[in-house]
Amino acid sequence: MRPLTWHGKHDIRCDSVPDPQIEDGRDAIIKVTPCAICGSDLHLYDGVMPEMRSGDVMGHETMGEVVEVGKDNTKLKVGDRVVVPFTISCGQCFFCKRGFYSGCERSNPDRSKVTNLWGNSPAGLFGYSHLLGGYAGGQAEFLRVPYADVGPVKVPEGLSDEQVLFLSDIFPTGYMAADFCNIQPGDTIAIWGCGPVGQMAIRSAFLLGAERVIAIDAVPERLTLAQAAGAIPLDFMEKDIYDKIMELTNGRGADACIDAVGTEAEPAASWDSRLDRIKVALFMGTDRPHVLRQAIHCCRNFGTISIVGVYGGFLDKVPMGSAINRGLTFKMAQTPVQHYLPILMERIQNGEIDPSFVITHRGTLEDGPALYKTFRDKQDGCIKVVLKP
């Protein structure tokens, strides 16, 4: 089959590899209809995440048609049209039984590696390094899905692929970001990062009852899309974000702040962001937490910091004194997609939201390497890429 494979920093290729096979009775093989490039994939593209190996198949936003089912899988049948969560979950362990599917204790065969780094292991993920299972991803013609009687969800008739594809990751992630904020009537939510997850968080915050959403970015197309949803756009290259949020909230701060950026904050944003970039380049640090620092300062007393941007290691100069003394609550996670997916499928069916609004670029797998660069460099107004094998 033809997949997109990783061969080093900024080196993605459309290769030819053997088709995936059933390895366990609960497996399924799906023929990919569309897949997408996620902002999290750019951390791999940029060489930020460790334990990637040459030839690893990329991608974790995938849906398609079931073409083969393991002997123990009674949930799916050949011909079913399914969307596949990016989190791989067994459905039977301590965490899965409690709905914390992204904390699955069984799905990461490389858990000892990540335990040394993080103290314990989350679930395995598709196409996201050998810290998290080394599973082949879904930017390919076919995908093997482990625990396929737990993860994939059948798509109802009448919904297009593009309407439901993002249930695999960015829609649940953006929705979870807003859900973490415990939004009350009249609340103001500030969101850093208006990429695909940020755009979903903006619309989810309004769905959950926010009165105002402040959208922070510097890419004109992203800010325009955020404004179209009703958000107040702020360009961090033109305005002092702290001063502007205080002005908009009468000096109180936002009721909740969402970090939808994570480790690769824009180095030109501020002096501390530039310093973070230097420390990473000199191997004196692992992450660039400028956005998290700013979100803490911009949050009102006893407000909430919701973190869905990806961080990989250790954060420097995070103002915990501010957070502790002002009573902030932190909520963060890799998204337990299986928990949110049925709720969000229903919202799509009811016409409350059509996640396909975020798509700006479409192509084939052969177009993938060039589109990775377009997406990474924010060229041609690129916000979200969908690929069709």
Image (spheres, rainbow, N blue to C red):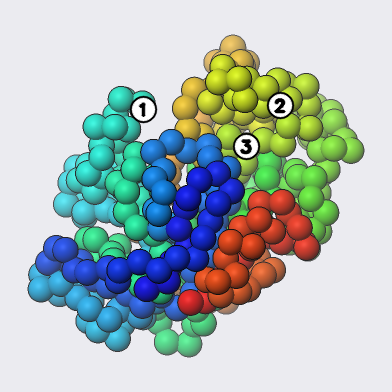
Q: Is residue 308 above or below residue 149?
A: above
Question: Callout 1: 10 Å neighbours few (<14), some, many (20+)?
Answer: few
- Who is closer to the viewer here, 360 or 128? 128
Query: Which mark is on residue 273?
Result: 2
Find disc 1 in the rendering and name its residue.
Answer: 118
Name the residue rendered at 12%, 67% in the picture.
25
Name the quadrant containing residue 283.
top right
Q: Which residue is drawn at 30% across and 25% down?
A: 116
Secondary structure of residue under mark 3 = loop
Q: What residue type is labelled 2?
A: Ser
Q: Circle 3 is placed at which residue position?
A: 264
Which is more N-terminal, label 3 or label 1? 1
Residue 171 in view of the camera: no
Point 45% across, 58% down: residue: 5
**Are the residues tagged 1 and 3 within 8 Å (C-beta)?**
no
Three-letter amino acid code at disc 1?
Trp
- Answer left or right for 287 relative to 212: left
Quadrant where the N terminus lies?
Answer: bottom left
Which quarter of the picture shows residue 63? bottom left
